[in-house]
Image: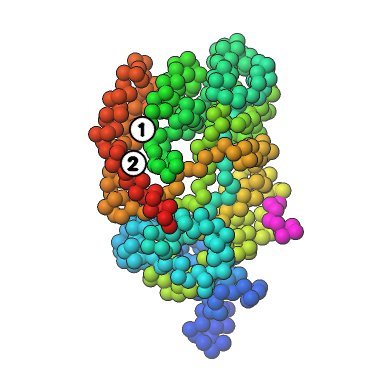
Amino acid sequence: MKKLKKIALIFLSVLMVIQCAGCGNNEKKTSGIQAENKDTFLTDEYIEFDIFLEKSEDEDGQWKVFKEAARMTNVGLNCTLSRNHSGFASAFNMMIASGDLPDLTWVKDYLLVAKYAKQGAFVALDEYLDECAPNISKYLEENPEIRKRITMDDGHIYYMPTIPGGYARYGYFIRQDWLDKLGLDNPDSPEAFYEVLKAFKTKDPNGNGKADEVPYLGSTESLNGLLTFWGSNPGWYSENGEVKYGPFEPEYKEALKNIRKWYKEGLIDPEIFTRANALDVLFGNNTGGACRGMIGSTAGLNDKFADNIPGFELTPMAPPSGVELTHRNKTNPWGWAITTSCKDVETAVKYFDFWFSEAGNHLINFGVEGEFYDLVDGEAVFKQEAVSQPDFRTKLTSTGAQKSIGYVQDFKYEEQWINQIAKDGFKLYEEGGYIKEIFPPVENTYSEDELEEYQKINGSITTHVSEYYQKTILGSNEDVEKTYDKYIKELKSLGIDRLIELQQIAFDRYNKR
Ligand code: CA
């Protein structure tokens, strides 16, 4: 079968060469893909851009979605990064250092974009947007905050990011069936939450006669959520324009004292810092009670465990503190850029713009029309038989859909395969007003010297903070009252004041954009 396909391909190529020779212009290239509608072409002559992007697993290394885009736009991609590279960042640095730049490149880190843009590696896209990119221009006009996030301090835009769909990210979940069994209300304050966890620990809601319940569990992100119960924050935030670092603020002390108390009382998973797949393991063996987790996947546990655990009902709840500190990125650090070696910048910008058009947006979000989805009244609707397959997402993304190029992710892509509980969870968090805006990505406003200083101090500070955090919560002999002053003193000697000063400079610059 494979052989046949190959022979057919060779035959087709031969045919193309003959055709080309026939048209009397040997220079003229062809995409080899018959276009249905030349109105959508971005260029009369087929052009193929080399791009620093992983090849697909297909025999020819081409993603199906990009082949379809070539059919529509007459612009193709030739991926130059082998699948066996040793980490994207080092491969990317080597590519830049070689001076041999492809036309386009995938990027994964806006600090690197800022760094190499200063050295002249990337085209300033903003200079072409009015002329060549009506869809991107319109989008940025309607979304000034996105424009601000991707504009560098020199006023230029050097990359188009992946712009996530949806807003809410993490949420609290609780075993509603356990609350019902014990006759408890949904806890709406940290104090009420504490009482519920105590009851989970002592009243045997899983009914096996053992005190084996793990009332609160999850990753360290789950644990960090508890900090808000005492008005604390695990990282950077701003208050009335003033930059603050949560672990250096007085509320942190109170929070650690209380989390430590909860931990010692057995309300928090004893292995919270080390347990892999905590939600799967502890909800799966019917011992987990409540957590803070990614809304979509945590809600999905209901489908996974309902058959084996009678009555299993893991339900999203409002944050007991009324505050949720995470949301999806408004722009991701990854996306793509045009290098200054690009052979045809205008066509490349038009191509970037294609992915912001309706056709391009459908293609990158939902794959090739007719394969996984159909257009129903102008809306992309996944075929039921496709969505219901357990490996649906893998199949879809293996075609290149959802590849993290510069595009706007459509939440409808996700909405169609998450369950109703997840939808309710997203709605609860997005409409409840709990989500606090996270600190913006200000690091790309730093000069090279400032960035180096920031990274150096930040490295030792975060190490010290996380060591103290773990030791305080887990330690058998720790007393926050006795260790806290020393902890603060150490933060100062590591340069916390200077770090806050640097972040304030960057934050002020960011706000001036
Ligand atoms: Ca039990």
Residue nearest the viewer, comparing 403 with 328: 328
In the rendered image, residue 159 lying in the magenta stretch gets the answer no
Does the numbered disc 2 mark a residue whose Cβ is under 8 Å from ligand 1? no
Estimate the x, y position of residue 65 in percent, counting from the top left. Answer: 58, 61
Residue at the extreme bottom:
24
At x 66%, y 60%, the residue is: 369
Crowding near the residue tagged with mark 1, few <14, some 14–19, many ≥20 C-alpha atoms within 10 Å: many
Which numbered marker is on residue 299? none
Residue 147 against residue 177 in the figure, above or below: below
Q: Amino acid at mark 1?
A: Phe
User: Which stretch is magenta?
Assistant: 374-383
Q: Amino acid at mark 2?
A: Ile
Residue at the extreme top:
209
Residue 253 against residue 149 in the figure, above or below: above
Q: Secondary structure at mark 2?
A: helix
The answer for how far apart the CA atoms under marks 1 and 2 are is 10 Å
Classify residue 507 as left or right of residue 313. left
Residue at the extreme front:
240
At x 57%, y 24%, the residue is: 189
Residue nearest the viewer, comparing 8 with 418: 418
Which numbered marker is on residue 248? 1
Q: Secondary structure at mark 1?
A: helix
Whether residues under marks 1 and 2 lie with C-beta atoms below 8 angstroms apart, the answer is: yes
Q: Look at mark 2 in the image and give the residue it sits on.
A: 500
Question: Which quadrant of the structure image shows residue 15?
Answer: bottom right
